[in-house]
């Protein structure tokens, strides 16, 4: 699979900076072999490596632990995006009622994505990998409702900031699904 181009690399860098400054962590070497081997089998290798290496628990993690770390990155993304959208409701006095309605819907959808990813963490702890995959897939899909809400109202342009956040969450979820596939393959190989 390898590394794909990340359409908005500066947004990813900003998100990772935000993640590391709001959740102080040390940059760790971790189990470089496991992290690199795992990440090379996901669609966004660079995102995977940088996210996992920014978490100090990655050094002692197995595949399930690495998946959990990535899910937590997704939770941070979805939660921050929901908060961002909610702040637009109160800070945008000149915006139309329609735009605020769409922002509200989007904030709710991103909160659903957060809830799905939190369910995924529980699924991982119970080794329910099929359910974990379902919850990650749902989390990646919730932003589509937000994008579609903007499409319903041609006068409202889909903000670039929101598109970058949507892409970020979808890429994070794709990495998680790639790790879950590896867990499934490893479990079945040893069965």
Image: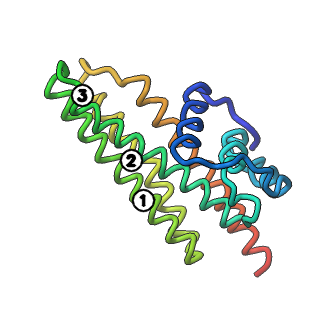
- Nearer to us of marks 2 and 1 is 1
Q: Which disc, if any, is residue 76?
A: none
At mark 3, the secondary structure is helix
The residue lying at 33 percent from left, 38 percent from top is 146
Q: Nearer the viewer, residue 180 or 168?
A: 168
Q: What is the x, y in percent for residue 156? A: 27, 21
Give the side of residue 90 with respect to residue 110, left or right.
Answer: left
At mark 2, the secondary structure is helix
The residue lying at 49 percent from left, 54 percent from top is 137
Q: Earlier in the sequence, mark 3 or mark 1?
A: 3
| Residue 138 higher or lower than 101, as above or below | below
> Which quadrant, please, contains the N terminus?
top right
- Nearer to us of marks 2 and 3 is 3
| Residue 28 higher or lower than 17, as above or below | below
Q: Which residue is mark 2?
A: 142
| Furthest residue toward right | 33
* Structural crowding at the residue carrying mark 1, measured as other residues with C-alpha within 10 Å and reported as few (<14), some (14–19) or many (≥20): many
At mark 1, the secondary structure is helix
Q: Earlier in the sequence, mark 2 or mark 1?
A: 1
Q: Which residue is mark 3?
A: 91
Q: What is the x, y in percent for residue 54? A: 68, 47
Q: Which residue is mark 1?
A: 116
* Structural crowding at the residue carrying mark 3, measured as other residues with C-alpha within 10 Å and reported as few (<14), some (14–19) or many (≥20): few
Give the side of residue 161 with respect to residue 96, left or right.
Answer: right
| Cα–Cα gap, marks 2 and 3 | 24 Å
The answer to whether the residues at label 2 and label 1 have Cβ atoms under 8 Å apart is yes
Give the side of residue 46 with respect to residue 136, left or right.
Answer: right
Residue 43: quarter of image: top right
| Cα–Cα gap, marks 2 and 1 | 10 Å
Q: Earlier in the sequence, mark 2 or mark 3?
A: 3
């Amino acid at each position: 699979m390898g590394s794909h181009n990340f359409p908005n690399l500066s947004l990813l860098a900003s998100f990772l900076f935000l993640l590391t400054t709001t959740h102080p962590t040390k940059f760790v070497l971790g189990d470089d072999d496991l992290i690199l081997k795992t990440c090379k089998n996901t669609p966004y290798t660079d995102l995977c490596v940088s996210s996992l290496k920014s978490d100090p628990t990655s050094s002692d993690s197995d595949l399930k632990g690495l998946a959990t770390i990535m899910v937590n990155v997704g939770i941070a993304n979805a939660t921050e995006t929901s908060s961002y959208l909610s702040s637009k409701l109160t800070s945008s006095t000149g915006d139309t009622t329609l735009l605020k309605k769409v922002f509200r819907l989007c904030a709710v959808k991103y909160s659903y994505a957060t809830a799905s990813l939190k369910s995924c963490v529980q699924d991982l702890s119970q080794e329910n990998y099929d359910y974990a995959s379902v919850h990650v897939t749902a989390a990646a899909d919730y932003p589509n409702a937000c994008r579609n809400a903007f499409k319903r109202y041609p006068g409202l342009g889909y903000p670039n900031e929101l598109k970058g956040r949507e892409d970020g969450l979808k890429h994070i979820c794709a990495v998680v699904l790639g790790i879950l596939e590896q867990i499934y393959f490893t479990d079945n190989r040893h069965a």
